């Protein structure tokens, strides 16, 4: 699971703008190896070879994600260093998703926010991206529906400005992830923060806020 979600995840019940301070606290917690902020949202994606359909977009910090997720090892094409580089912005797709869109590295896709995420004027804006990587996680849900982009580019698409959905962590011992999660929770003082290890997250402890 470390290809797409961290061993431990910190979420917040409302606007999460102070994530840099939380990152600093989390990284000092015993058992934590690395941490990175992320966002996650449901959008529409289209290509020249396929009409729009729903996709899950995850925004990650290009400088930090390699220390938290092993997504780089799952890339069939490209590297994590490509995120945040070039114009239009880079995006990485699950291999089944790329096949459905009929795109390869270097091709263009377009992301469009859903109606409830649209601009104040009420007109959703289209954002072009360049396919810079294709990954295979061996989990159908992610290979068929997940796209990954640099945090700043994803924030622009979903109108989050300088906000995140959460922070995900890598821990020294995955078998101790639940204990590290409780230690992080104590360090943050509990609510409004919700801290879950990967087992809790998969069981649905975060409702539909799935990273």
Image: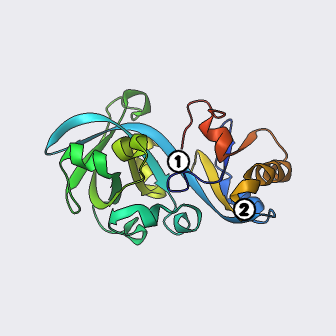
In the image, taking residue 160 as reference, residue 201 lies left or right, namely right
Tell me if I can see residue 127 in this picture.
no
Q: Which mark is residue 144?
A: none
Residue nearest the observer in this picture, 94 or 86: 94
For disc 1, the neighbor class at 10 Å (few under 14, some 14 to 19, many from 20) is: many
Residue 179 to residue 54: above or below: below
Judge by depth and name the residue closer to the eye, 51 or 200.
200
Residue at 33 percent of width and 68 percent of height: 78
Q: Quadrant of residue 91?
A: bottom left
> Is 114 displayed left or right of 161 in the figure?
left
Image coordinates of residue 208 in percent, x first then y, are: 56, 31
For the image shown, how many numbered marks are present on the structure?
2
Q: Which residue corresponds to mark 2?
A: 173
User: Element type at marker 2?
Assistant: loop
User: In the image, what residue occupies the spot 22% across and 42% down?
Assistant: 100
The label nearer to you, 2 versus 1, is: 2
Find residue 204 and report its image quarter: top right
Q: Which residue is mark 1?
A: 39
């Amino acid at each position: 699971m470390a290809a797409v979600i961290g061993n431990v995840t910190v979420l917040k019940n409302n606007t999460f703008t102070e994530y840099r301070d939380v990152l600093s606290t989390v990284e000092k917690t015993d058992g934590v190896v690395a941490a990175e902020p992320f966002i996650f949202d449901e959008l529409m994606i289209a290509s020249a070879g396929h009409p729009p359909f729903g996709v899950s977009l995850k925004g990650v910090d290009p400088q930090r994600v390699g220390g938290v997720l092993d997504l780089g090892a799952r890339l069939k094409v490209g590297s994590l260093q490509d995120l945040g580089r070039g114009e239009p912005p880079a995006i990485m797709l699950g291999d089944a998703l790329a096949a459905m869109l009929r795109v390869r590295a270097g091709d263009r896709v377009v992301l469009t926010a859903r109606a409830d995420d649209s601009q104040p004027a009420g007109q959703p804006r289209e954002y072009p991206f360049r396919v810079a990587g294709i990954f295979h996680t061996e989990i159908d849900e992610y290979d068929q529906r997940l796209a990954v982009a640099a945090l700043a580019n994803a924030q622009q698409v979903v109108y989050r400005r300088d906000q995140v959905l959460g922070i995900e962590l890598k821990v020294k011992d995955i078998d101790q992830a639940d204990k590290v999660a409780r230690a992080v929770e104590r360090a943050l003082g509990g609510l409004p923060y919700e801290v879950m290890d990967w087992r809790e997250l998969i069981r649905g402890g975060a409702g539909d806020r799935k990273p």
